[in-house]
Image (cartoon, rainbow, N blue to C red):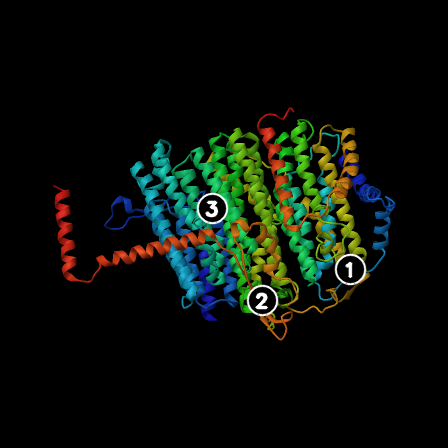
Amino acid sequence: MSVAIQFTLLVVLAPLLQGLMRSIRAKLQGRPGPSPFQPYRDLRKLWGKAAVLPAGSSAIAVAAPGIVFGAALTFATLVPPIGGETSLEVNAVALALLLALGRFALVLAALATRSGFAAMAASREMTFASLTEAPLILALVSVALAGQGTFARITASQAPLAGILAAGALLLVMLSETARMPVDNQETHYELTMIHEGLVLEYSGWELALLQAAAYVRQASFFILAALMLPGNGLSSVAWIVVLIAFIPLVERMYAKMRLFEVPQLFASATVLALASIGLRIAGLGAW
Amino acid sequence: MTIRILGCAALLATAGLAVAALALHGAPSVAIVPFIAPMELRLEFSSTTLAMPFLAVIALVLPAVAAWGLRRGAPGDGFRLALFAVAMIGVFLAQSVAAFFFAWEAMSLVSAFLVGAHHERRNVQRALFSYIIVSQLGALCIVVALAVLGAHAGSFRFADIARSAAGLPIGLRSAAIALALVGFGSKAGLVPLHFWLPRAHPVAPANASALLSGIMLKVAVYGLLVVGFVLAAPLPLAWGVAILVVGLLTAFTGALYAAVDSDFKRLLAYSSIENLGIIIGTLGLASVAAALGAAALSTLALVALLFHVVSHAAFKSLLFLAAGTVAEAAQTTDLEHLGGLARSLPFSAPLVLVGCCAAAALPPLTGFASEWLVFQSFIGVLAIATPLLQAVVAVAIGVLAAASGLAALAFAKLFGIAFLGEPRTTHPAARESPDASVVALAWLALACIAFGLAPAFVFGPLRSVASSLTGDTTLTVATLPMLPVTLAALPFLGAVVALFLGRRWGIRFAPTWTCGSAVTTRSQYTATAFSKPIRRIFGFVLFPERQKTSDLGASHWFPTRIRYEVTTHDVIDEGARNVAAFVQRLARRARILQAGLLRIYLVYAVVAVLVVLVVSR
């Protein structure tokens, strides 16, 4: 699959991915739940509405959703395509720092609103981001190690076990990046527990639509990255994505939200997983 | 005003001196032989390839400091700073042990005057005292290290020492490297010799801090490069690993303390520690790569660290000068009392934002380009090293990543708390006018953007410098030239579109939702609150302590006033204080010998003569 096709599919199907997971989770919780296509309707509705921002907020707050959306799209273009050799010289660090760019803009926007809730969410978001930076980069480096410093031959010398460990680390990071249980709760509007929702609390209308679309695209990109790390390539990567769509809601169904200060342990485990994955490759056990 | 203009001219002349030194590269060295000259005291100066990036950094930063001083700071600062810069240029040009030591001591002495500018304050006196002690002990280590190398070579010219470097016995080599690491490390703020830095840099005037952090710390890097890659080259593998570990420990420590600090200038000082840790860790990596026989990777690591030297000089000088602007406008650098500065400093604020983004290593700014190169060199060594080293490098990458995450937090806090929202005090900052100090910030911000957008123009010259140390000329990094633009194009476009749509469709502004209560200057989040999760998560090293005192009014449930104070403990700082106290106690004991009685001194003299006679018999 070429980069362009994958990018188009990723952007178009990203809301569906979210919708599917939302309805699966609803079924698991014994609710009928919304249609898998609900995110598209939400986006269309929000896009048609005017934006309201807190009085006195600066140009940063107006521009931030655009920056976040642009960063998410760039992130999606940098994800190596499923099933293909590619000359794309993407780098683990560039991906991580790109995520940091969008986050930085959003955090500044939150602080510009003068709302205590948004600032509290900003503080937590930056805290978790600084703790997930290590496992994220290490997991990607572990994969890059197979292709000598780049993703160029991401699938060529894949090692199943090392890949699974790296994917595990990446998924734990993803729970935080996509505001999922047990790190965060996408459905809460109780001010003291929100992280990502709190960050975008003051946004509405088309600005909120941009932020949500960006979140969907980022999430879909993470799914593809994880699928590429898991054994097999081509169709089996697609199969892994399907498995993950069912698996993530199950995780969310099984766990309650962790206490804020217990979450770092989760990230510590992610770091250990990523280091173990690199360790396997170092030890030459990559053939497992 | 005349004094300001003269000071500005002096600084510009010094920048010209740096440029002239750059232009004189390759010219024969100049030797000054003092008239009672033993050859050891020969002062030799020359413009070497290795010094070029550092001289260029001086030429980059000085014009900004000069322009800033036209409007702000004390009137006479220009001359002191020019003298300081001349001394640093002297260090970069020195080609003999005596010349190096002379210039180094001149630099330390002048910088001590800069740190002690407000010497009437108690905290300045303490900071100055610890700075002088540490820098003199460091200088002692450096001179002994250079003397050891010179004694082995039989000459105190750098060229002769470098020629005989290959034949150094391991014991001498290790001794020289260890002493140099302590000496230069204490100047660079390497853990555990960093405790003086977060005290000394913030108390200096802003323009002095800009030079102290922007350039003087790099003099230490230059010194380590000279010893490690020229005078005692090649560094043994074990020393390379040791430098790498110490560097990364420093990077993490600096980032952690920067994340939890709530003073504008002290946060910047801690961030300097972090960046110097990254630079010196990469220096260790470069020597590890060289020891493993990977010359191209060693070159890459050297380019990365030199690029980060340039980056850090640009953004940190910018931010320190901005701290001076903030201090003059708001009369404080305490983040708890700042806020909403974007409105009172409309010209400086966007430039500070550029500096903060560069410090957080965000694309497409210079901090991103250099940090990306640093990561690339670590990943490169990870791919080729022996298993045990690979494990070390893998952990190192994790530490680097965590440090960069914490730095992003620190700078989001710095800009978000100080410049956005509402002022946190009742007397808001004075509104600035577009003057020379804004031009100074703009010059450095421009450098941050230009080096980030066109990294190839920095990469090329630095590669030839690094090649001169490693002898490898094959290095190319194909992705670098376009990477920052590729990453930042869509976000930039997104920002423009969002601003355009905001204007086109209109944005309604409504009061902030805070559960029905009004937004007041005190209801906003504070810097301490912002960093609370980090303080708590890393409580096992930060030892946070909370003190809450409430003034109870009529009812227990409605206190009239709550005072809330949070402190963290710096273990190393306290250790240093204990050592200092011990030394002082010892000194007090030793004072008994100095009784002030002539008879006792005569006894000492007689005993000394007897000892000399017995020993020399």
**Residue in view at x 49 percent, y 55 percent:** B569
The relative height of residue B296 versus residue B548 in the rendered view (above or below) is above
**Earlier residue among tags 2 and 1:** 2
Marks 2/1 same chain: yes
Q: Position of residue B278 (x, y in %)?
A: 52, 45
The relative height of residue B277 versus residue A117 in the rendered view (above or below) is above
**Residue in view at x 58 percent, y 36 percent:** B379
Q: Secondary structure at mark 3?
A: helix
Mark in the foreground, 2 or 1? 2
Q: Secondary structure at mark 2?
A: helix
The relative height of residue B474 versus residue B518 in the rendered view (above or below) is above
- Compared across the picture, whether B262 is left or right of B109 comes to right
Q: Secondary structure at mark 1?
A: helix
**Earlier residue among tags 3 and 2:** 3
- State which chain disc 3 sits on: B
**Earlier residue among tags 1 and 3:** 3
Q: What is the three-letter code of the residue carrying label 2?
A: His
Q: Position of residue A272 (x, y in %)?
A: 60, 37
Q: Is residue B558 visible?
A: yes
Question: Which quadrant of the figure has residue A236?
Answer: top right
Name the residue beneath numbered marker 2: B337
Q: Quadrant of the C terminus of chain A?
A: top right
- State which chain disc 2 sits on: B
- Compared across the picture, whether B106 is left or right of A38 comes to left
Q: Which mark is residue B52?
A: 3
Q: What is the three-letter code of the residue carrying label 1?
A: Gly
Q: Position of residue B201 (x, y in %)?
A: 47, 58
**Residue in view at x 44 percent, y 57 percent:** B14
Q: Which mark is residue B502?
A: 1
